[in-house]
Amino acid sequence: MSAADFYAGRRVISAVENERKRIKAKWGNLGRVRLMAPPALRERYDRQEARWEAAVQAGELAGLQAEQPRMLRALQAIEREAREVRAATDVPPWFEVRLSNGRVLAIARTREEAKLVPHRFVTMTLEDICYWLRQRLDSATPVAEALAGARVVETEAVNWERPFRADEPSDIVG
């Protein structure tokens, strides 16, 4: 394989990887988008992904060039289906809580999702809430007092410099 073929192959692979990164940034992860597709489309996507991975492993430029447009179409198809599913369910990517003063607090998982919240809402991310708790609550006892009716069952130290491993709310690092 010549150097020119190597760099041409990297460009072909990068196009697919960039599309995957874009989808991941928008939806959280590719697996979530894949699961929103109906079984028949998901099966076709899985077959195409296997063909793409085989072409990458083989490292032949002609194979990569043949599979790249197909893989890009497969990624676009499952994302299109995910958009339709989300539009049909019409579930916003944040939680809404009515405050005692009548305003609405929107709690978003990430800063990107917080940008989608209407401006009339008070908006916080999970990171903001963790920061707020860290600033105001020093032990388990004030937590129970601050959150009326709450019962503290267990506590553990949290690395506040990087509290999350991923964008998932349940993924708090101890």
Image (cartoon, rainbow, N blue to C red):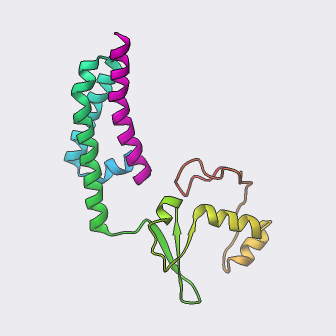
Closer-to-camera residue (14/41): 14
The residue furthest front is 4
At horizontal 22% and vertical 35% (from top left) the residue drawn is 70
Comparing 164 with 73, the one in front is 73
Q: Which residues are magenta?
A: 1-28
User: Residue 96 vs residue 15: left or right?
Assistant: right
Viewer can see residue 110: no
> Is 46 rendered above or below residue 37?
above
Q: Is residue 63 above or below residue 135?
A: above
Q: Position of residue 27 (x, y in %)?
A: 40, 53
Figure check: 144 above or below 51: below
Name the spot of residue 29 as percent of width and height, x first: 42, 48
Q: Residue at x 45, y 75 (%)?
A: 118
Regarding residue 12, the answer to whether it shows in the image is yes
Residue 158's spot in the image, x, y percent? 71, 54
Q: Position of residue 93 (x, y in %)?
A: 43, 65
